[in-house]
Image (tube, rainbow, N blue to C red):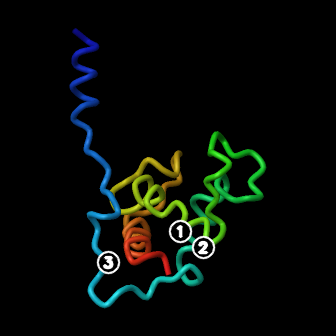
Amino acid sequence: MKWLALVLLVGCADAPIEIADYACPEGGTQLTFENFGQQFLNANCNTCHAATAGHRHGAPASYVFDTLEGVHNHRDRIFVRAAASNVSMPPGPEDPPAEERDRLAEWLACGAP
């Protein structure tokens, strides 16, 4: 019976918001890789997801976010894991605040310029 409760609880978890479900603001965004994305990714992702990351803590080698090309290659995945109300990444107690996750969502939804 305990496993049934666990299955039901897990089944009730909210599905992540997809990038296609998050609109870029009308008129676009002022956020760019240079003035937002690079700093956000360096502070919250690139300990494990940079090309030069020594110990990647299980992050796949192909998931590299320290260049704009790398972000574009994985934009949908970054969104589902870390933008808006999606909070599965980064792991640990030092999560970025909701306002920063919302900015990440805007930047990614607008094409990560």
97 is higher (above) or lower (below) than 30: above
Which of marks 1 and 3 precedes in the sequence? 3
- Return the residue at label 2: 68
Distance from label 2 to label 1 (Cα)?
A: 6 Å
- Return the residue at label 1: 72
Closer to the camera in the image, 22 or 94: 22
91 is higher (above) or lower (below) than 17: above
- Return the residue at label 3: 24
Image coordinates for residue 10, horizontal then vertical, percent: 28, 30
Label 2: element kind: helix
Could you tell me if the residues under marks 2 and 1 are in contact, i.e. CB atoms within 8 Å? Answer: yes
Distance from label 3 to label 1 (Cα)?
A: 16 Å
Image coordinates for residue 23, horizontal then vertical, percent: 28, 73
Left or right, 44 with reference to 16: right
- For marks 3 and 1, give the one nearer the viewer: 1
Amino acid type indicated by mark 1: His
Distance from label 3 to label 2 (Cα)?
A: 18 Å
Image coordinates for residue 43, horizontal then vertical, percent: 60, 64
Q: Which mark is residue 89?
A: none
Disc 1 packing (10 Å; few <14; some 14–19; many ≥20): some
Left or right, 81 with reference to 34: left
Left or right, 9 with reference to 74: left
